[in-house]
């Protein structure tokens, strides 16, 4: 009986599955060391009087980070901030992606709106808050509107750039073979634009949280921003830092989840660092 074998080319590599990435203990140790150095310098600045007298010590801030967890007002404020930022972010993503793909693929529309897009992305959104507040009042609707106005621009710009990424040869091929619009959108335009869109979505998530907290600080709409203002008025700077810590933690968690989701969804677009 003859057994046939198939030789593998020298440069060919058979991939049976991606190996799980191991924890980089050296990198983890470096990050922990960096935090220790920062905290040590912070504590040194407080004890030596380099920082203002109102600056809290590291121990006070860490203590407050845990003590606020027992405060029902903190959880209520956190839910309000997360609800406003998430709602505004989702609206910004949906509208930014749709408008960006339309503007990027329709050349006359792209040329006619380029000035508006460039002006809008550079305009300070916070300057619109008095007008929006006058129209909607100090409500959650106003806060969501401000979040949308702040977070829509990264998604819009990245969607436009992604839709412009199409290879001219692919565009000509689509026209020659008269590929249906639905198939062209799902198999040509969307895969080409997705890496850019994912970047815009990830950036806008952080902006949405910052915008929500900032609006709450300035307008006293219920949320973490309002608690930060109340803590400052009461000279409880350790509490203010604790609330800022949780706002930052939420932003970091969202960015990490989006980064992992992008890695799975766009695995074909990842580049090896090796």
Image: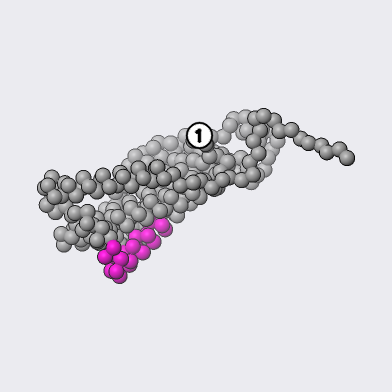
Residue 208: % across, % down? 37, 52
Q: Residue at x 66, y 33 (%)?
A: 12
Residue at the extreme front of the image, as rendered = 1
Main SS, magenta residues: helix
- Compare residues 116 and 8 and report the one nearer the observer: 8
Q: Which x, y percent locates residue 197?
A: 49, 44
| Disc 1 packing (10 Å; few <14; some 14–19; many ≥20) | few
Residue drawn at x 49%, y 40% as measured from the top left: 196
**Left or right for 170, reference 128:** right
* Residue 19 falls in image quadrant: top right
Q: Is residue 183 magenta?
A: no
Which residues make up the magenta segment?
A: 66-87
Q: Is residue 273 above or below residue 19?
A: above
Residue located 26% across and 53% down the image: 130
Q: Is residue 219 visible?
A: no
Going by the picture, which residue comes out furthest to the right?
1
Q: Is residue 195 above or below residue 227?
A: above
**Residue picked out by circle 1:** 274
In reply to whether residue 70 is colored magenta, the answer given is yes
Depth order, front residue of 54/207: 54
Report the quarter where the N terminus lies. Answer: top right
Q: In the figure, residue 266 lies in which quadrant?
A: top right
Q: Residue at x 64, y 36 (%)?
A: 13
Residue 250 in view here: yes
In the picture, measured across the screen, residue 94 lies left or right of residue 242, that is right
Q: Give left or right: position of 147 versus 186.
A: left
- Where residue 43 sits: x, y (%)? 19, 49
Q: Nearer the viewer, residue 263 or 128?
A: 263
């Amino acid at each position: 009986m003859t057994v046939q074998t198939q030789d593998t080319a020298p440069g060919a590599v058979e991939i049976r599955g991606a190996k799980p990435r191991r924890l980089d203990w050296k990198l983890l140790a470096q990050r922990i060391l960096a935090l220790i150095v920062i905290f040590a310098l912070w504590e040194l600045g407080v004890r030596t009087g380099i920082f203002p007298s109102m600056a809290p010590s590291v121990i006070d801030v860490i203590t407050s980070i845990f003590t606020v967890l027992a405060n029902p007002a903190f959880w209520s404020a956190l839910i309000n901030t997360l609800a406003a930022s998430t709602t505004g972010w989702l609206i910004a993503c949906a509208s930014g992606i749709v408008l960006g793909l339309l503007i990027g693929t329709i050349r006359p529309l792209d040329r006619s709106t380029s000035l508006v897009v460039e002006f809008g992305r550079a305009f300070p959104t916070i300057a619109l808050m008095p007008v929006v507040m006058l129209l909607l009042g100090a409500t959650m609707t106003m806060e969501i509107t401000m979040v949308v106005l702040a977070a829509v621009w990264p998604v819009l710009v990245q969607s436009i750039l992604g839709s412009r990424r199409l290879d001219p040869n692919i565009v000509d091929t689509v026209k020659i073979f008269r590929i249906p619009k639905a198939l062209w959108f799902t198999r040509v335009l969307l895969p080409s634009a997705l890496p850019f869109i994912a970047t815009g979505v990830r950036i806008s998530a952080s902006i949405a949280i910052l915008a929500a907290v900032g609006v709450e600080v300035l307008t006293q709409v219920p949320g973490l921003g309002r608690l930060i203002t109340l803590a400052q008025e009461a000279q409880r700077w350790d509490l203010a830092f604790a609330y800022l810590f949780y706002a930052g933690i939420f932003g970091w968690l969202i960015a990490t989840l989006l980064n992992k989701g992008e890695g799975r969804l766009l695995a074909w677009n990842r580049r090896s660092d090796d």
